[in-house]
Image (spheres, rainbow, N blue to C red):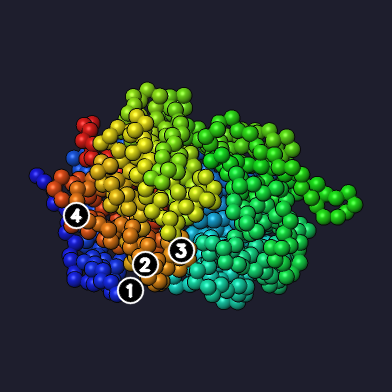
Amino acid sequence: MRMIPPRAPREATVHREHGLERPDAYHWLKTDGRSSERVLSYLQAENAYLDAVLAPHAALVDELTRELRSHIQERDEVPPVQEGAWLYGTRTEEGQEYPVYLRRPAAGGPEEVLLDLNALRVREGHANVWVSGTRPSPDGRYWAYLLDTTGQEVFELRVLDTHSGQLAEVPLPGVSGWTLAWGADGRHLFYGTEDDTQRPDRVWRHEVGAGMAGDALLLHEPDPTFRVTLSGAANGESVLIGCAASLSTEWFWLDARDVSAVPQVVVPREAGVEYVLEDGGDHWLALTNAGGRREFGLVRLPKRAGLSWGDARDVLPYGEGRHLTDLRPFAGHLVLLGREEGFTQVWVLPRTPDAEGGDEGYGAARRVPFAEESHTVMLGGNRVFGARQARLRFTSLTRPVEHLDLDLDTLDLTLLKTTPVPGYDASQYVAERVWVEAQDGERVPVSVVRRRDTPLPAPTLLYGYGSYGISIDPAFSASRLPLLDRGWVWATAHIRGGSELGRRWYDAGRLTHKMNTFTDFVAAGEGLIRAGVARAGHLAAMGRSAGGLLMGAVLNLRPDLFRTAFVGVPFVDVLSTMLDASLPLTTGEYDEWGNPERREWYDVMAAYSPYDNLRGGTYPNVFVSGGLNDPRVAYWEPAKYAARLRDVMQDGSGTVVLRTHMGAGHGGSSGRFDALREVAEEYAFLLAVAEGEPTP
């Protein structure tokens, strides 16, 4: 019996913008609201339809879930990070969904359980739980963490008194999940709150146990295009407060040792000027694009009021071939993170104090060598300012994450732990980088991984993102193994809009250049077929969030190129979202997409907005997903898209399904095993529904 997908009610709604009429039969999915019975009934009907589509393949879903789980070392612990007199870390237990947060004395002694998320979830009756950040007080007496129980990214701040094992005070509600730091006295901490659009806009100082009502407001950012961030400086002497728009930043600082200190600006904001700030002791350190340093240069600034970028001095010579992204000062060294030759890299500079007692200087930058050219390296947890080693994390498409200690003097690397992956033999897999030619002649890199014994061309899943300057670097993922072991190729297109090839790569994929992101992805698919990697007619595409926008746009451009597409939590209703300044993220993203209140930017977005450009035609199989509580891409975007896609599909099109996670947000379910089940459903749709492979 042929299954019939649910039909969303249609209403005659017409938007009139800039003298243009834009009909939208499914606008009610937004205006009714996520608690509306009509909305909930429709989303539940869509979930039931997907369940019915997958029901004949239930054995395959179960098999894939078992395979995915078989590659997880269920009881595992990451190498702990020292902070003060304690070593802090997490451990997962066999059969448990969530991590346990632990610490033990650095000098030796029994471990203490700070937080067992599994027990908390059961005790408090939550469907999902997320912790966005944790910070111990400098003396170790208190341990603060930010907890979300809905997926809406609205957090509460909890402070554990480690002496009593109980919360030190009533949790502080409505706190931003991205701002948390302690003062040097271990009694005061700093947190952020958000405005009605979930934009972090305020920073507060709080005394533990004194209640929230008396907290001191330290900074309010009134500009709706700016968001507030907060961190403690590496040397523990300053609290650093950033106000950031997409293309402009401004930093404030206050003395972490002074409980009455107020924020002071470092360098005032300028349109188009960005910088990352750290405390260098007797000077400021910054990575900035000021002064024509497009790929960001490392500079130092004196610690005084009234600074401008004319006061900056280069710490190392600026070069267009090196894109700098982050820095971490230590007492005797400076560690830089960035990109060169298309891959992440690490540089170390020694600090060289002036023999006559003047300002500190810096020696030559040395790049840390890695044996594998195609790799990803990240800074790990580094909380001891006087350390002579830096914690790094290293991975590649075939190497699970390795936790390394880098000797800052010799650049020697010591392997602390390789993430265990049961049932995985790295020698059976091979990775390579393929270059394809884009529509305008630009060369676009594509990272490819497969089993060595997979004959080419093979069915291929092509993943992409391409927005906000976020790079999708070559990294290992055990969740790919069920596909690779079935003869699939996994490919990642490093398209413009990301920063894989530096800032120029990002700038070439945003605003008026946004179409490059979509045509690059199409070129990647076509190029893999021409190169004999991907099998024509068996190419799948996947993207999430802004990558979901990518999916919608490329399906409008070339629906014939793909057999299947996974359109995850997709930003597909671009005009409706960007015209609504009350939504989270909208005002802060005008520099990424443009402000459609201005006709010229409206026209740019109207040219590619996936929802608005759906036209009658033959479309592939499409798996759309969303989260009812998603604050980043509202549930109604994927719901509207799936409904309208079915309206325009002609005979010969594939199956369109919609999964809405009813108790989660942008990232899906929080439990590690629940998340695996969601991956298994997508793979079963790909293998059994779209490809028609036999089920077990």
Determine the secondary structure under disc 1: loop
Q: Residue 103 at x, y = what percent?
A: 61, 47
Q: Residue 514 at x, y = what percent?
A: 41, 55
Which residue extends farthest front? 441
- The reply to whether residue 541 is in sight is yes
Q: In the image, what residue type sits under mark 4?
A: Gly
Circle nearer the N terminus (3, 1): 1
Please report the residue visible at 16 percent of the width from the left and 59 percent of the height from the top.
7
Q: CA distance from mark 3 to mark 1?
A: 21 Å
Determine the secondary structure under disc 3: helix
Circle nearer the N terminus (4, 2): 2
Residue position marked by numbered label 4 in the rendering: 616
Please report the residue visible at 43 percent of the width from the left and 34 percent of the height from the top.
434
Which residue extends farthest left? 1
Q: Quadrant of the C terminus?
A: top left
Circle nearer the N terminus (2, 3): 3
Q: CA distance from mark 1 to mark 4?
A: 26 Å
Q: Nearer the viewer, mark 1 or mark 4?
A: 1
Q: Quadrant of residue 687?
A: top left
Q: In the image, what residue type sits under mark 1?
A: His
Q: CA distance from mark 4 to mark 3?
A: 31 Å
Residue position marked by numbered label 3 in the rendering: 589
Q: Residues within 10 Å of mark 3 (few under 14, many from 20)?
A: some
Q: CA distance from mark 2 to mark 3?
A: 14 Å
Residue 86: image tag: none
Q: Depth check: give the residue in front, 441 or 287.
A: 441
Q: Nearer the viewer, mark 4 or mark 3?
A: 4
Q: Quadrant of residue 437?
A: top left
Q: In the image, what residue type sits under mark 2?
A: Tyr
Residue position marked by numbered label 1 in the rendering: 18
Q: Quadrant of residue 615?
A: bottom left
